[in-house]
Image (tube, coloured by chain):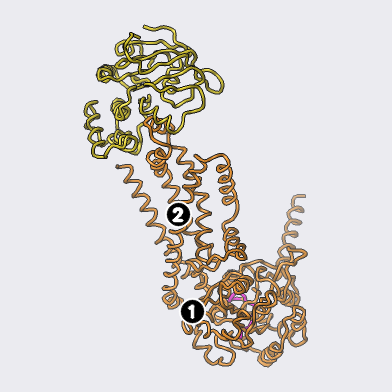
Amino acid sequence: MAAGVTAVLEVTSLEVRRSGRPIVAGISFSASRGEIVALMGASGAGKTTILRAIAGLDPIGAGTIVLDGMTLKPGSIHRGHTLRELHRRVGIVFQFHHLFAHMTAHKNVWLALVHVMHRPLADAEARAHELLVSLGVGDRSAALPHELSGGEAQRVAIARAIAVEPPLLLMDEPTASLDPARRQELAATLRQLAAQGRTIVIATHDAEFARATAHRVLSIDEGRIRTVS
Amino acid sequence: MRVAAVVSLALAWGSVARAQSQELRWGGDAEGGAPFVEANPGDPTRVEGFDVDVATLLATGLGRVPRFIQTGFTTLDAATARGDFEIGLSGIEDTPTRRSRLAVTIPYYEFREILTVRNADRDRFRSLADLRGRRVATLGATLAYDLLVDAQARDGIIPVTYEDDVHPYSDLALGRVDAVVLDFILARRGALRDTSLFNQPQPLAVGHYVGVLAPTQTALRDRMNEILRSAMRDGRLEAIFRRWNVWNEDQPRLYARLLADSTSTPVEPSSLASANEQGDAARTFSGPRTWEAAWRYLPALLNAALITVVLSCLSMSLAVGVGMLIASGRIYGHSSLRAALTIYVEVIRGTPLLLQLFVLYFGLAPFIQLPAFLAALLGLGLNYAAYESEIYRGALEAVPQGQLDAARTLGFTQRQILVLVRAPQAFRLALAPMTNDFVALLKDTSLVSVITVVELTKQTSIFAANIGSWVVPGAMCAALYLALSLPLARIARRIERGWRRA
């Protein structure tokens, strides 16, 4: 990390256990403002586990995560106020998107703006529409999640995650549901988001995509960082 | 060898068949209790009572062995007509309807209908005319009930029907009703059990107990009449009623009239009119034709259907509300709350609704006297809440964890996640089983008649008992239930279709 550049994310000696067994251990890396970092590795390597720990979805066993000035430490699952503070700082796009199945694409995006950010409804709707248009799915606003293609659902999920303007965006296996042409489009979109000042951490097994998109690629194998390129 | 086996089998079969023909199967309701028919306290598989003794008397006279067939009081007529047993004996009243539908024996006992009130009211409530606007209890499908329906039109009393003869008196003592009209035997027992009750001396009407047989069994009926007459002559019948302590001076007078007239109908059927104005009996009770009766009963059935609808809707609302709270508590609550709610659900699901209704209405009566409708609403609502809660719990747990994680990372609170994301999707999954439960609840409301709420099924059975046939009342009742449940299923389907399109 270059001196003088703000680290949005600083992961130090992270260990995550499940049923007492460490899934990942000794993970240390950082990401600065506007940077795209790819965690690369085969499935089961522990990439998703790292993302979930950063997003505060799973408790950490050892080490620390510093996220835009807020520190996560080992202990039980984060609750209430702490968790909400954390979630203002990080957004996540899941591999299977997990859009709210009973709402239109548009409502999926504006829901948190109204209920978490307390923005007026009209304002939130306009912002959501703007985001969908900028991601190229403006015409799919009224569709329900099951009516969207994999690529469309992913774009709606990105819009939903960045609507609340977290400084850090996590993406789990973003190319899993995309054909090659769509992959290029996604790479362009991510670079554009980074250029706007967002920090992005991608977990992927797609080496080509990782190299083409990220500023830095960390290879993860059996829960540890092997190489950095 | 084989031939011998077949022959001996046939002989064995023949002897079984012969043994059956030597039985006199008689139907009665052991719930009717002493002194009619009741389970022997020492050996509940055996019954005793004066009706048991009369059955034995008849069987012995015919050279047969009596065998008791338990049958609900309100279905005795129908069971007799379809041949479940040769004769029904259970304090069955001699009415014009029974005479027109069944073969009826000569009466073997005369009773008076008695008005029972609380001691404090003995000077205030001397007759039904004094009870305008008040609740008067009796057993359904009896002469006393007809008496009350008559008084409802004439004196403005409110009839309340019970399924047994104990609770009318306990509810009278508690103040849930202001009077009870039942025959002298029951009234005397009621007043003996609770000394705060008083039996008015002036009878409201006079009636007779008879045995009933299928309409084709007139030959058997005539033989039984001979047996009864001979038992009246030689004092065997008197001995039976003395043994059960119900013999009085009315009986010798009745027997004298019966012995003086050898026809099969020596006395008038039990009369609705009070004892000293029997001339009016025929006018009040002229066996109506079925369709005419159906027309007369239609308003009462529609009214009962309304009660069924209102009760169903209110109890379903209660069940949905409480069910949601239970389901949320079982998913989000502290472990002690979860354990308590699990116990509630298992106890409610593992015990009969009928028992729960009895406990709510009669069991709690010494501590809190719930009005019948409220008890029915609570009983049904809290019972169905247990089932609804399981539907909601399953539906809530079926919402994918990924969506809940997504909602958490967007910064929603647990409460917001439940209200905005989880519950709306769970509700879609729960709609079909909920519709199913609502239809089941609609029909389960028929159980609340045991706590004196007259809903559609109860009104139908009163109707059927009074006209002596289930065909037309049953069809009308079924049509009403269908008219209530079919639109419900349609509405649910429409909502589901709306969701799929949205």
Same chain shared by disc 2 and disc 1: yes
Chain A in the picture: what colour?
yellow
Q: Which residue does the numbered mark 2 point to in the structure image?
A: B438
Which one is earlier in the sequence, the residue at label 2 or at label 1? Answer: 1
Q: Is residue B303 left or right of residue B6?
A: left
Q: Which residue does the numbered mark 1 point to in the structure image?
A: B133
Residue B342 seen in render:
yes
Position above or below: A187 against B346: above
Residue at figure coordinates x 55%, y 88% from the top left: B273
Residue at figure coordinates x 48%, y 67% from the top left: B455
Disc number placed over residue A221 in the picture, else none = none
Residue B182: image quadrant is: bottom right
Residue B352 pos. (x, y %): 59, 55
Let me know if residue B123 is in the magenta part: no
Chain letter matching colour orange: B
Q: Is residue B309 left or right of residue A2?
A: right
Q: Which residues are magenta?
A: B205-216
- The chain letter under disc 2 is B
- Residue type at mark 2 is Phe
- Count neighbours of disc 1 (C-alpha within 10 A) and say few if under 14, some if 14 to 19, many if 20 or more: few
